[in-house]
């Protein structure tokens, strides 16, 4: 995941990752019928996103993907751990510097219906970020330039969000994220609400923009096929932990963590000789994040779980000659479970 330690182009010391999370933990105080409890949404994760790279975060609903995204965007403060952007701890920055940094890190959320102000024209929506940041007209990308970047003609400038289709609205949300020339975009289920054919168009747009503008993405998604297509690296989360991470192609070709194996086995595949296209994968119920299993977090659902698994938590450690990391006692040796 990390390129830390690589020399800079000038050969003068280590290159800072664009975004780096270290020991990142987020706990929420929640009310339950049995009183106040602590819910650990993100538990001690390390993640780096280098400039110009796409890092995907996958895992079942509630595993902590969006919380991780919000922490990396400095929309929430971690309970423990740090988030740095180009070496600066975002939670230690003076207000003015954090404001400046916010130009570099931008979100694109799932639902453009919610995230675009219906009373504003597209032109107003796309001009707003520069106004909020006090950038004079001409100091940032023009509305026409932004619309062109996302494949919408300038004719859309005076329209309102409700006059646009879902795909067009998401293009506007992407254009707004690009308004201040960011370096890093958190795409949180950015295409999940769209029809499949429109999804493909918006994914191609995100892919083209990433290459042309040298952007880095944290790409949060339930859709493993999309992740495989788009992401350079993938982190698999389970109950707030990263359980496997590494280069996407290697991880998908030979997943070492039983949870990754089961997740991948549930991805629809083309029909082969009359077999059902979706492998039946029975994982049982996801434990409540309030009752996280002792030992390995996956032990209550893992077909390979042993007594060791139920008592000792496996560390996320290098496997497969260091090509990736996995948090499983048997990551190197176990037969695939799916
Ligand atoms: N503000 C909050 N207060 C209390 N609990 C929260 C809060 N935000 C998230 N959680 C809890 O933290 C856990 C992780 O939530 P998160 O939204 O990050 O998951 P997710 O992986 O994005 O899920 P999904 O795929 O459904 O979007 C969940 O159990 C969720 O209920
Ligand atoms: S440590 Fe044990 S329970 Fe956890 S994933 Fe590995 S085999 Fe399964
Ligand atoms: Mg989410």
Image (tube, rainbow, N blue to C red):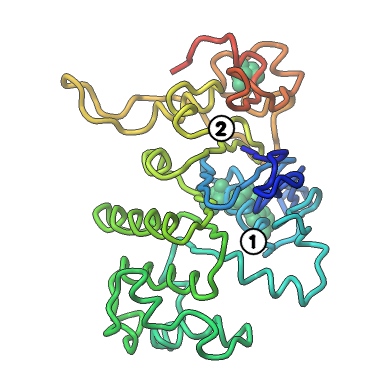
Q: Is mark 1 within 8 Å of ligand 1?
A: no
Q: Is mark 2 within 8 Å of ligand 2?
A: no
In this view, the residue farthest toward the front is: 10
- Name which quarter of the figure residue 258 lies in: top right
Quadrant assignment for the C terminus: top left
Q: Give residue 126's position: percent from left, percent from top.
A: 45, 81
* Mark 2 residue crowding within 10 angstroms, few (<14) / some (14–19) / many (20+): many
Where 19 falls versus 100 (above or below)?
above
Quadrant where ligand 2 appears: top right
Instruction: Write down the residue under mark 2.
Output: 246
Which one is earlier in the sequence, the residue at label 2 or at label 1?
1
Q: Is residue 257 left or right of residue 100?
A: left
Q: Residue at x 39, y 87 (%)?
A: 121
Quadrant assignment for the N terminus: top right
* Mark 1 residue crowding within 10 angstroms, few (<14) / some (14–19) / many (20+): many
Q: Nearer the viewer, residue 111 or 256?
A: 256
Q: Give residue 210's position: percent from left, percent from top.
A: 44, 56
Q: Give residue 47's position: percent from left, percent from top.
A: 66, 43
In this view, the residue farthest toward the left is: 274
Query: Mark 2 to mark 1: distance in Å?
Result: 22 Å
Does the rendering let one see residue 192? no
Does the rendering let one see residue 104? yes
Instruction: Write down the residue under mark 1.
Output: 73
**Mark 2, secondary structure of its residue:** strand
Q: Residue at x 83, y 63 (%)?
A: 92
């Amino acid at each position: 995941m990390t390129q830390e330690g690589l020399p800079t182009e000038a050969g003068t010391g280590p290159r800072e990752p664009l975004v780096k999370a270290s020991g990142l933990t987020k706990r929420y105080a929640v009310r339950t019928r049995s009183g106040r409890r602590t819910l650990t949404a993100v538990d001690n994760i390390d993640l780096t996103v280098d400039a110009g790279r796409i890092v995907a975060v996958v895992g079942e609903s509630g595993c902590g993907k969006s919380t991780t995204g919000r922490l990396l965007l400095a929309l929430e403060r971690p309970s423990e751990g740090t988030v740095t952007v180009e070496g600066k701890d975002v939670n230690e920055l003076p207000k003015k510097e954090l404001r400046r940094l916010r130009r570099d890190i931008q979100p694109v959320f799932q639902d453009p219906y919610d995230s675009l102000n219906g009373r504003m024209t597209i032109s107003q929506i796309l001009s707003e970020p520069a106004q909020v940041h006090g950038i004079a007209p001409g100091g940032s990308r023009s509305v026409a330039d932004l619309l062109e970047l996302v494949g919408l003609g300038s004719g859309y400038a005076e329209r309102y969000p409700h006059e646009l289709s879902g795909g067009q609205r998401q293009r506007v949300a992407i254009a707004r994220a690009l308004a201040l020339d960011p370096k890093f975009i958190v795409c949180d289920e950015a295409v999940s609400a769209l029809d499949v054919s429109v999804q493909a168009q918006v994914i191609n747009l995100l892919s083209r923009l990433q290459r042309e503008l040298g952007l880095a993405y944290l790409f949060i998604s339930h859709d493993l096929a999309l992740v495989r297509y788009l992401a350079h690296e993938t982190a698999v989360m389970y109950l707030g932990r990263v359980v496997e991470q590494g280069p996407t192609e290697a991880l998908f070709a030979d997943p070492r963590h039983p949870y990754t194996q089961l997740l991948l086995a549930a991805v629809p595949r083309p029909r082969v000789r009359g077999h059902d296209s979706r492998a039946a994968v029975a994982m049982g119920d996801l434990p409540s994040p309030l009752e996280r299993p002792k030992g390995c977090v996956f032990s209550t659902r893992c077909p390979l779980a042993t007594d060791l698994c139920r008592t000792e938590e496996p560390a996320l450690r290098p496997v497969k000659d260091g090509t990736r990391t996995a948090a499983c006692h048997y990551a190197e040796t176990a037969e695939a479970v799916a």
